[in-house]
Image (spheres, helix red, strand yellow):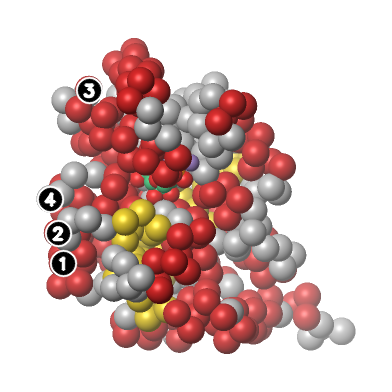
């Protein structure tokens, strides 16, 4: 017996991908850009990119410059970028340059997480999709790899507020691998990792034993498993999604490059100040993360934005390399 299914992971993967596209009801609401559709049909590497980072995570026009640079990096690594956004009530997977420019320049875009999608589609809203909503759309389109800056998580004080990002439950239910630089220490990182463990989400460190804290390479908290190559990460992804058939996503933590990292002494006090300001101003719920990001940028005189842009580019590069490896094996 040399032809059992165990010896044919490629065929299993292909079947799994096409059935994902056909059977997901969400795919009826999705408009896939022709270049992205062609890449998916050819099983060529594709990297999904989120858009709340454009509408709420960074100021314009740096947001647009970042989005264009990130797409260029993905292309240079041999993959097709698919920025995902809600435009006039249509969930778009892949934006051409003109669409991306118009989207980033638009003011008044809403923030769209999973729970907002149905209402925002009916209202024909335009909005940035969070990690959670972007994962849902990516999975429905058949995209397995997604790059962002930082994910949402368990907020400090969550024991009182119950503020836990829907990004974490999405990771627990949607088979997409998310490459990030950890999570900002506006969050309670230890509780964030506990929550991911409960959700059955593997947290993998790329070249790192520690879960990084976004602006800095270390947090004092360990990842579940460390891998030092894109090829190995691709094999873990293929095993989780195609061989085990698990629905849970994977979190890949890629620490910011040492030369771009901010000194903890420089950033920690300002993060604490931003959290205190949010509290004093009564900012809560979906407004909290955008408020904190903007306030930290002000308090660091733009240094946080510079670091943020650098790490998103590094994550896009790693995600593209993993996507290329995954296309080779799965
Ligand atoms: N963290 C960042 N930058 C971001 C976000 C989080 O460092 O831009 C955005 C992402 O889109 C993420 C969302 O999915 O905020 C999480 O929002 P909330 O905490 O409300 O779930
Ligand atoms: Mn929240």
Image coords of residue 5 (percent x, y): 78, 80
User: Residue 199 location in percent, x, y?
Assistant: 69, 47
**Do tag 4 and tag 2 residues touch (Cβ < 8 Å)?**
yes
Of labels 2 and 3, earlier in sequence is 2
What's the distance in space between the residues labelled 1 and 4, CA to CA? 11 Å
- Distance from disc 2 to disc 3, alpha carbons, whole Å, reads 24 Å
Tell me the crowding category of disc 4: few under 14, some 14 to 19, or many 20 or more residues within 10 angstroms, Cα based: few
Q: In terms of sequence position, does the residue under pointer 1 or pointer 4 come before the other?
A: 4
Asked whether the viewer can see residue 39, the reply is: no
Which type of secondary structure does the marked residue at label 4 adopt?
Answer: loop
Q: Earlier in the sequence, mark 3 or mark 1?
A: 1
Per the image, label 3 sits on a secondary structure element best described as helix
Q: Height in image: 163 above or below 250?
A: above
| Residue marked by disc 1 | 102
Q: Residues within 10 Å of mark 2 (few under 14, many from 20)?
A: some
Q: CA distance from mark 3 to mark 1?
A: 29 Å
**Distance from mark 2 CB to nearest ligand 1 atom below 8 Å:** no
Pointer 3: what residue?
A: 299
- Foreground residue among 309 and 86: 86
Q: Quadrant of residue 192?
A: top right
Instruction: Please say if the residues under marks 4 and 3 sit with CB atoms less than 8 Å apart.
Output: no
Q: Which residue is mark 2?
A: 105
Secondary structure of the residue carrying tag 2 is helix
Q: Is residue 161 left or right of residue 119?
A: right
Residue 123 lies in quadrant: bottom left
Q: Secondary structure at mark 1?
A: helix
3D distance between C-alphas at marks 1 and 2: 5 Å
Label 1–label 4 contact, CB within 8 A: no
- Residue at image point 57% right, 80% down: 25
Label placed on residue 53: none
Q: For marks 4 and 2, give the CA distance.
A: 7 Å
Name the residue tied to disc 4: 61
């Amino acid at each position: 017996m040399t032809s059992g299914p165990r010896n044919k992971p490629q065929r299993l993967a292909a079947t799994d991908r096409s059935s994902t596209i056909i059977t997901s009801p969400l795919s009826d609401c999705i408009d896939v850009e022709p270049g992205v559709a062609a890449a998916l049909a050819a099983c060529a590497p594709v990297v999904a990119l989120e858009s709340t980072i454009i509408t709420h995570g960074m100021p314009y026009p740096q947001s647009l410059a970042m989005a264009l640079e990130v797409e260029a990096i993905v292309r240079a690594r041999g993959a097709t970028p698919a920025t995902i956004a809600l435009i006039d009530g249509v969930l778009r997977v892949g934006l051409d340059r003109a669409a991306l420019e118009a989207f980033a320049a638009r003011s008044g875009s809403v923030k769209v997480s999973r729970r907002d999608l149905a209402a925002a589609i009916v209202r024909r809203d335009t909005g940035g999709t969070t990690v959670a909503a972007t994962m849902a759309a990516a999975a429905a389109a058949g995209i397995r790899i997604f790059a962002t800056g930082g994910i949402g998580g368990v907020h400090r004080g969550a024991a009182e507020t119950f503020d836990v990002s829907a990004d974490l439950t999405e990771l627990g239910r949607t088979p997409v691998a998310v490459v990030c630089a950890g999570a900002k220490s506006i969050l309670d990182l230890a509780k964030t990792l506990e929550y991911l463990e409960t959700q059955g989400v593997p947290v993998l460190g790329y070249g790192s034993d520690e879960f990084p804290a976004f602006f800095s390479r270390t947090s004092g908290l360990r990842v579940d498993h460390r891998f030092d190559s894109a090829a190995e990460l691709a094999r873990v992804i293929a095993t989780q999604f195609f061989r085990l058939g698990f629905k849970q996503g994977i979190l890949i933590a890629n620490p910011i490059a040492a030369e771009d990292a901010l000194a903890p002494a420089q950033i920690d006090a300002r993060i604490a100040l931003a959290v205190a300001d949010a509290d004093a101003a009564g900012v809560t719920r979906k407004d909290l993360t955008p408020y904190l990001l903007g306030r930290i940028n002000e308090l660091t005189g733009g240094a946080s934005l510079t670091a943020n842009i650098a790490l998103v580019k590094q994550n896009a590069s790693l995600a593209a390399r993993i996507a290329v490896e995954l296309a080779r094996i799965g």
